[in-house]
Amino acid sequence: MSNRPTVTEIFKRALELREKTPSGTYKELASQLKGEFGGGAFPETAYLTIPEYDNIVPEEDWTAGLSVVLRGIQNEDWNDVIHGIIISLEQVENYPKQSGREDDPSKNWRNRSKRIAEVENEAVGKWMPEDLMAVARRNVSR
């Protein structure tokens, strides 16, 4: 690891450690992360990001800990930095268990493409001339 880790690197390291010991507690994980990163330079606030998990968790959940991470960097407090990482990790891990994946087809109320398709069909049916609709139907049925 470089002298100045990024928030993304710390988050990815947290994921690696969770894979190695999935039965470990978040408190143990936080302690291990603090041991690895705690004595070094703080991440730059310009790189205050973690990998996107939009396909698993809503953005407001996977980014939940970033404000705590930012506060930790600004106050030079590794406890807050690590706590923010743990908050985001917890959301990424627990949201799918509690409510199912965002892209789960059985969760129609979360199926964004279904809603888009319904509106699109309504708009096409309303505005496309009947002769073009007939051509489109013939092409689809082939």
Image (spheres, rainbow, N blue to C red):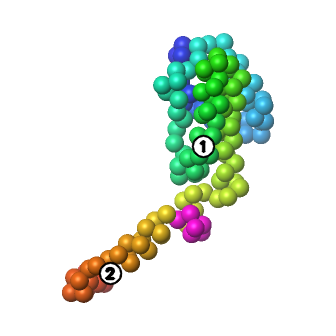
Query: Which residue is nearer to you in this view: 21 or 63?
Result: 63
Relative vertical location of residue 100 with respect to residue 72 in this rendering, above or below? below
x 65%, y 18%: residue:
75
Residue linked to disc 1: 62
Relative vertical location of residue 83 with respect to residue 113 in this rendering, above or below? above
Residue linked to disc 2: 126
Distance CA(mark 2)–CA(mark 1): 39 Å
- Residue 46 in magenta stretch: no
Q: In x, y percent, where is residue 55?
A: 53, 52
Q: In x, y percent, where is residue 34?
A: 70, 21
Q: Choose the circle earlier in sequence order: 2 or 1.
A: 1
Relative vertical location of residue 118 with respect to residue 40 in this rendering, above or below? below
Query: In this image, 66 relative to 141: left or right?
Result: right
Query: Which residue is nearer to you in this view: 9 or 117?
Result: 117
x 33%, y 81%: residue:
125
Q: Residues within 10 Å of mark 1 (few under 14, many from 20)?
A: many
Quadrant including the C terminus: bottom left
x 60%, y 34%: residue:
66
Q: In x, y percent, where is residue 120?
A: 37, 72
Quadrant including the N terminus: top right
- What residue range appears in magenta? 106-111
